[in-house]
Every structure is written in structure tokens, then in C-alpha cells.
Image (cartoon, helix red, strand yellow):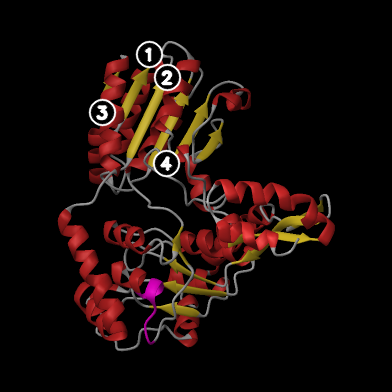
């Protein structure tokens, strides 16, 4: 793990992180382009062919039946079901507070306002097979349901025909009945353009591998997407009162995601830094995914020594991390210093995994510095807004000369005539 003590070293590390999250290889672009074109032109036939090729699933039935969903969900023990239910209840309660309302006001002979309507149809992509994430079902489906989305189609790959019971349990709990056993770029293309079996959607949300990310990027504009998710990251700011055991555990919990994940500590205390490094070494050996975590720490992990907490937050704002943990005394007092972060975890009893599963806020977050301009997935992602205008004759006549003058200046005579003809 690199240790950073100077401004120039920080800038070098920032560049490394930026390069980690940017760009796709030509091979990936070409592969995804071909898949999208094949799905557009050949529909189900291409979708079944790619499902057989990439997932080794020879089933000719793309849709997972309700009986199959229920059957696999029954295999899950009650304690896990209860954990899912508690998480779902907390996620729903949080997202209900994001609901906005339409509004309007009267102004000089006019009614002006904004009309909010839910999207009609949304596609949710959920990783499947051995790397299965029932929490992803909860985090992506519940905000759409709270928003009032009418139709939710869910795609989940089933490598070698293996259906994951835990994902099915989450699907059953949320009463999702339109579920397809397809994955990869081909699933994204099917959702975007539609096939004989899968009707097209208005928006696609959910994480996936690099091929899924590239496909989402390519279909954006045909449909909306949530964001292009990159490798995961956590940044921890710690003072001299922080607990190195907690810091190390939280850094490693992020590092075990994959080899491209980034775990960063910024501290004012050299003692805390030294003790954290020792703790990382001790705890790393206990992880079942120690090889992955070790590579992540070595490649994209960093410990940054600063003189003041103000400098720590300045660096953090420049990196705009997906997850930001603040392990300082009176952490809430530091909130005004935070400008860019996907999710903010305050205090030593608020580790990032709480947010991954059960706290309530969404775990679909901007990565790779995009927290500078992106937000967590929420109810607002499943809402579209229309402007509302309704003028009386008097209101029109009062404003007409202004509009006519501007239209004439811009050389748009048709616009001006639309006003003049009513005068």
C-alpha cells in the first residue's frame, strides 16, 4: 500500500484512480457493439444464442415463471428472509421520504408549474449465478416501486442454468413477476430495444460487469440509465482518537469487492497510520477473499498523511469518493466541510457495510469521482417532470410584446407570427 505525504504524490495517486475508471478497450467496445446490433436485428434468436454462448444456458425459455421463482424462494431459510424483510422495510421507509409532488402557481394571468409522473416501464439488471446479490434487487426495485413505476422487468443471468434462491427470495418478496434469465450486454440491449419476449423499457438501472457498463453507455439516449458504475471505493478520514481496528476492517471490506477496488485512509496521526497498517496485515489473513483484497490494497490502496483535518477534507472533496467514512471526534460538526461524496458515514459505529445492506439509503452510488455531479439512486431517478403553462387572454397579451421582440431579434419569424396572429 502506497503512503502519501506530499501534494505531488497525492496528484499522482489521483491520476491513477482517474485512469482506473476511465475508458473501455477497443475489444470490449467492438464486442458490445456487435451484441447490440445482433439483438436489435434478430431479437430472441440472438438473445438465446448469446445466453448459450456466455452463460452456458441452453434453455429456450427466457422468462422465469412465477412457480420457479416461488420454488427457489422456498429453499431460503427463514432467518435470511427476515433479514431481507427488515432491510426492505428500512429501504422503503427511507425512499418514501424522497417523494416529490407536482406544483403550480398563478402569475399575471397564467398558471405555471411542474407536473411529476413516474416512468411507465423500467428494466433492472441484477448480477446472478455465483456472484448473486439479493441486496441489489432491494436497492433498485424499491425506489421504482415507491415512485409508482407501472412495470418493472428484471434481468438476472443464470450461468449453467443455475438459479440463485436468495435472489429469487428477494424478487418474490417485492412481488416482481416479470423476470428473465438473461445477462450481460445482451440483456441490456434487449431491455433497450425490445425483443419478441422482452418489451423495451424507458430506463435501465443496476450494476454489472464491464460489458454491462459499456452496453448501458451505448444505449443511453435510446433509453435512460442510472449511471456507469466503476470499481468500488471507500475513503476514511481519521483523527488521533480513531480505532485502527475499525479503520482496517472497513478498508478491507471494500478491498474484497474486486482487485480494482480502492481503499484510502487520510489521517492527521502517524500513530494511527502505523497501527492501521499493522491491523490490515493481521486482518487480511482472516479473509476468505484475501487474494483479491491484497491485490486491491497493493494496486489502489493508499494512506495519506496530512497536517490538518481541513486538508483531509480538501483531498476528499477532490477525490469525490463513493463512500466517505468520518472517524473523528464530533463527526457531525465536520459535515459542512464535505462537498463531494456518494454516501457519508459519520462516526466509528457507522461502517460502510451498514449502507450496503440494511441502513436504508441506497447503495447504488456514483464512483470514480463522479460524486462531483452524480447522486445516489433514488425515487427521483424514476420520475419525469413536465412543465405546465396555462395563460388567460390577458396574460397572453401582457407578455406577447416581450416574446415577439425576442423572436424577431433571433430571426425566428414563425415564432413571432405565432404571437402576432393572436393579437
Q: CA distance from mark 4 to mark 3?
A: 24 Å
Lateral position of residue 34 relative to residue 178, left or right: left
On the image, numbered disc 4 is attached to which residue? 370
Say above or below: 148 vs 356: below
> Residue 193 at x, y = what percent?
38, 75
**Do the residues bearing badges 2 and 1 touch, measured as CB atoms within 8 Å?**
yes
- 355 or 50: nearer the eye? 50
Q: Are marks 1 and 4 in contact (CB under 8 Å)?
A: no
Residue at x 51% of width, y 26% of height: 327
Q: Residue at x 23, y 35 (%)?
A: 299
**Residue 267 has which mark?**
2
Left or right relative to 250: residue 362: right
Which labelled disc corresponds to residue 1? Answer: 3
Going from N to C along the chain, the mark reached first, 2 or 4, is 2
Residue at 57% in and 64% down: 144
Are discs 3 and 1 less than 8 Å apart at CB?
Answer: no
Residue designated by label 1: 270
Amino acid at each position: 500500500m502506497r503512503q502519501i505525504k506530499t501534494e505531488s504524490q497525492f496528484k499522482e495517486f489521483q491520476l491513477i484512480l482517474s485512469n482506473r475508471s476511465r475508458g473501455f478497450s477497443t475489444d470490449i467496445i467492438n464486442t458490445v457493439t456487435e451484441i447490440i446490433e445482433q439483438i436489435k436485428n434478430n431479437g430472441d434468436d440472438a438473445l438465446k444464442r448469446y445466453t448459450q454462448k456466455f452463460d452456458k444456458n441452453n434453455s429456450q425459455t427466457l422468462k422465469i415463471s412465477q412457480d420457479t421463482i416461488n420454488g427457489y424462494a422456498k429453499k431460503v431459510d427463514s432467518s435470511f428472509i427476515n433479514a431481507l424483510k427488515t432491510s426492505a422495510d428500512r429501504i422503503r421507509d427511507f425512499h418514501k421520504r424522497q417523494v416529490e409532488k407536482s406544483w403550480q402557481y398563478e402569475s399575471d394571468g397564467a398558471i405555471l408549474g411542474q407536473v411529476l409522473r413516474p416512468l411507465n416501464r423500467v428494466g433492472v439488471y441484477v448480477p446472478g449465478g455465483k456472484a448473486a446479490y439479493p441486496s441489489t434487487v432491494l436497492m433498485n426495485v424499491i425506489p421504482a416501486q415507491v415512485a409508482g413505476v407501472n412495470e418493472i422487468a428484471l434481468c438476472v443471468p443464470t450461468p449453467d442454468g443455475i438459479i440463485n434462491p436468495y435472489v429469487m427470495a428477494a424478487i418474490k418478496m417485492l412481488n416482481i413477476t416479470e423476470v428473465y434469465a438473461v445477462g450481460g450486454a445482451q440483456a441490456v440491449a434487449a431491455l433497450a430495444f425490445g425483443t419478441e419476449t422482452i418489451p423495451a423499457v424507458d430506463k435501465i438501472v443496476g450494476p454489472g460487469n464491464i460489458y454491462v457498463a459499456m452496453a448501458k453507455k451505448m444505449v443511453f439516449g435510446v433509453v435512460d440509465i442510472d449511471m456507469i458504475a466503476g470499481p468500488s471505493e471507500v475513503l476514511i478520514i481519521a483523527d488521533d482518537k480513531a480505532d485502527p481496528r475499525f479503520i482496517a476492517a472497513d478498508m478491507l471490506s471494500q478491498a474484497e469487492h474486486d482487485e480494482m477496488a480502492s481503499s484510502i485512509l487520510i489521517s492527521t496521526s502517524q500513530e494511527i497510520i502505523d497501527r492501521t497498517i499493522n491491523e490490515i496485515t493481521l486482518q487480511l489473513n482472516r479473509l476468505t477473499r484475501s487474494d483479491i483484497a491484497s491485490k486491491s490494497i497493493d494496486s489502489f490502496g493508499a494512506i495519506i498523511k496530512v497536517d490538518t483535518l481541513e486538508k483531509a477534507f480538501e483531498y476528499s472533496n477532490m477525490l469525490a469518493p463513493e463512500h466517505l467514512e468520518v472517524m473523528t471526534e464530533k463527526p457531525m460538526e465536520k459535515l459542512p466541510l464535505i462537498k463531494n461524496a456518494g454516501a457519508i458515514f459519520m462516526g466509528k459505529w457507522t461502517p460502510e457495510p451498514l449502507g450496503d445492506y440494511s441502513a436504508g439509503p441506497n447503495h447504488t452510488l456514483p464512483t470514480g469521482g463522479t460524486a462531483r455531479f452524480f447522486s445516489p439512486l433514488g425515487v427521483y431517478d424514476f420520475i419525469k417532470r413536465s412543465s405546465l403553462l396555462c395563460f388567460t387572454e390577458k396574460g397572453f397579451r401582457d407578455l406577447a410584446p416581450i416574446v415577439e421582440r425576442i423572436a424577431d431579434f433571433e430571426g425566428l419569424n414563425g415564432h413571432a407570427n405565432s404571437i402576432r396572429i393572436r393579437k
